[in-house]
Amino acid sequence: MTTLDDPGSYIPPTRLRQPAFWMAFVAIVLLICGLFAIALPDSTSGPVVWEFSANHGLRQADVIGLTLLVLGSGLVWITGLIWQWRYAR
């Protein structure tokens, strides 16, 4: 049961207007898309971008997935800093 008397169970609707909420949401979407791009099989990953050896290489989807993971991780870190600066004072 959600009541106004228990602040732990009630999320005010103004939280949805906070930039940290949407930044965290976008970061999670970027991370999930990056993981899916890296997990694609070789038949759908596109051409080889960088070949390490005869059996190992970096394909186009791997590069896109890695880029999305780096962007998502950076956004999570920045969102955490904003959240601490804004709410943990």
Image: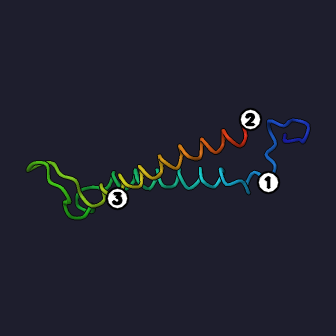
How packed mark 3 is, by other alpha carbons closer than 10 Å (few <14, some 14-19, many 20 or more), is: some
Q: Residue at x 67, y 40 (%)?
A: 85
Which comes before the other along the chain, label 3 or label 1? 1
Which amino acid does the dot numbered 2 rest on? Answer: Arg
| Front-most of residues 34 and 87 | 87
Q: Which mark is residue 64?
A: 3
Please name the residue that numbered disc 1 is placed on. Answer: 14
> What's the amino acid at mark 1?
Thr
The Cα–Cα distance between marks 3 and 1, rounded to whole angstroms, is: 35 Å
- Left or right: 26, with 12 as reference point: left
Q: Could you tell me residue 69's position as x and y percent?
A: 41, 50
Secondary structure under tag 1 reads helix
* Alpha carbon separation for disc pair 3 and 2: 38 Å
Earlier sequence position, callout 2 versus callout 1: 1
What residue is at 55 percent from the left and 46 percent from the top?
Answer: 78
Q: Quadrant of the N terminus?
A: top right
**Residue placed under numbered mark 2 in the picture:** 89
Front label number (3 vs 2): 2
